[in-house]
Amino acid sequence: MSAPDSEAVRKLFAGACEFVAGAADIDAIPPASLPEVAFVGRSNAGKSSLINALTGRNALARVSQNPGRTRQINFFDLGGVVMLADLPGYGFARVSKAEGERWRELIFSYLRGRASLKRVALLIDARRGLMESDREVMTLMDRAAVSYLLVLTKADTLKAQEAEHVAAGVLAESRAHPAAYPDVIVTSAEKGLGLDLLRMHIADLSMAPPPS
């Protein structure tokens, strides 16, 4: 399978990207119509900021200064080619146990049952590295056989050598997880670091022609 060329990828992410639906429960999730890539991570890991940066928008996905505010799965149609799904964050201590359980059930019901889902981008805050809640999510995705790519966010908050060290540690730990994609992409929504690599990864899942 040949990968899409860089100009096609640039045009895709510079083109139209429209909000499709927000789903606060599993029954409200829109029917699958396109290849899908989901973004998940701890609350305040930078999911919405990364989606905005990838698509060159300032407010496509809502960014909140208060962790735990995203309470639904938000779907965005990128150029009629790929659906981007912004999932609620996990691991935020200030939500009730019942609400936390409801969010987790929504996330994992979606992950387990979405045939169009090509990959999950699991966002890891570079300042914190892998935390126990991240490891729990990785194990759950392993069990559900949901392929995921580890994406280090907010790398601009560290020195380059420190970010590389965190990424190496995350990659080493991920090798024990069968559903983990064998790479880590280091990003900064603020500085644009790693965004072209992530765009190419997403486009490769959705735009590359089938084998002849």
Image (tube, rainbow, N blue to C red):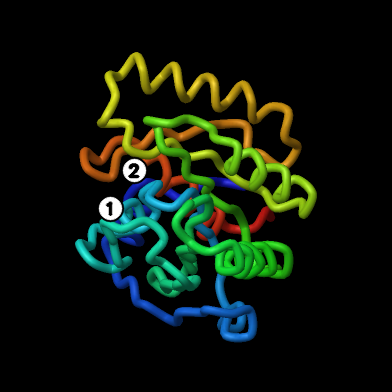
Whether residue 175 sits left or right of residue 196 in the image: it is right
For marks 1 and 2, the one nearer the N-term is 1
Mark 2 is surrounded, within 10 Å at the Cα level, by few (under 14), some (14 to 19) or many (20 or more) other residues, namely many
Q: Residue at x 47, y 69 (%)?
A: 81
Q: Farthest residue toward the right?
A: 143
Whether residue 142 sits left or right of residue 127 in the image: it is right
Q: Amino acid at mark 2?
A: Leu
Element marked by disc 1:
helix
Quadrant location of the C terminus?
Answer: bottom right
Query: Residue 107: percent from the left, percent from the top?
Result: 61, 64
Element marked by disc 2:
helix
Query: Residue 154: percent from the left, percent from the top?
Result: 32, 37
Mark 1 is surrounded, within 10 Å at the Cα level, by few (under 14), some (14 to 19) or many (20 or more) other residues, namely many
Q: Are marks 1 and 2 in contact (CB under 8 Å)?
A: yes
Q: Residue at x 61, y 78 (%)?
A: 32
Q: Which mark is residue 208?
A: none
Residue 138 higher or lower than 39, as above or below? above
Query: Residue 41: percent from the left, percent from the top?
Result: 49, 50
Q: Which residue is mark 2?
A: 195
Q: Residue at x 54, y 35 (%)?
A: 131
Q: Amino acid at mark 1?
A: Ala
Q: Which mark is residue 53?
A: 1
Q: Residue at x 26, y 30 (%)?
A: 157
- The image quadrant of residue 21 is bottom left
Seen from the viewer's position, the closer of residues 145 and 6 is: 145
Q: Is residue 116 visible?
A: no
How far apart are labels 1 and 2 at the CA level? 8 Å
